[in-house]
Amino acid sequence: MTELLTPGRTRLVGFGLLFASFLVGALTGAAVDRVLSAEEPDGRPRAERAEGERRSYVIDRIEMSPEQRASIDAILERRSERMRAVWHEVEPRLDAITDSARAEIMHVLTPDQRAQYERKLEERRARRGKHRPGEDSMKRGGS
């Protein structure tokens, strides 16, 4: 049996869906904010970690012998070296993609907006310490 929706009921369903959409968006925003502003185990924000300071890994939360720790540190260092090698291979291609997208964006913006965009990019580079997160050897900012 199909029940017809009256105009009042249709409006109520519409408002309910709109509210649900806003709620999902708010929860998603809160979750993203939590991830991006997460703290290190010692309570410091990740952004305050000194350059070169070791990142926190899940394995760091497991008690182990000094020999195990040394072995795991060696494994993680080898992984970092391999990741840096891969990064250096793909970095020019990724930079070209980013530069191309930025050039396209600049063509869409007004002169005032272009100036604002450039300032925001510079602020972002300054916040990141002019390197990409997780890459101690990188000296460029992000998009």
Image: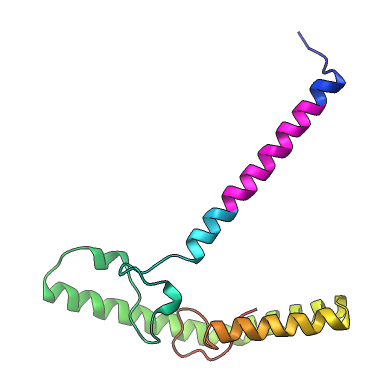
| Residue 63 part of the magenta segment | no
- In the picture, which quadrant includes the C terminus? bottom right
Q: Give the quadrant of residue 66.
A: bottom left
Q: Is residue 58 above or below residue 72?
A: above
| Rendered location of residue 98, percent (x, y) | 69, 80
| Rendered location of residue 16, percent (x, y) | 71, 32
Q: Tell me which residue sits at (54%, 60%) in the image.
A: 33
Magenta region, mostly helix, strand or loop? Answer: helix
Q: Outermost residue toward the top?
A: 1
For the residue pair 134 and 9, the one nearer the viewer reads as 9
Q: Tell me which residue sits at (55%, 88%) in the image.
A: 130
For the residue pair 92 and 139, the one nearer the viewer reads as 139
| Rendered location of residue 1, percent (x, y) | 76, 8
Q: Tell me which residue sits at (85%, 82%) in the image.
A: 112
Q: Is residue 106 above or below residue 64?
A: below
Left or right: 116, with 126 as reference point? right
Q: How many marks?
A: 0
Q: Is residue 135 above or below residue 29?
A: below
For the residue pair 46 and 87, the one nearer the viewer reads as 46
Left or right: 71, with 45 as reference point? left
Q: How is the image coloured?
A: rainbow
Q: Give the quadrant of residue 78.
A: bottom left
Q: Is residue 69 above or below residue 4?
A: below
Q: Tell me which residue sits at (44%, 65%) in the image.
A: 38
Q: Give the quadrant of residue 5.
A: top right
| Rendered location of residue 69, percent (x, y) | 18, 74
For the residue pair 130 and 74, the one nearer the viewer reads as 130
Q: What segment carries the magenta color?
A: 11-28
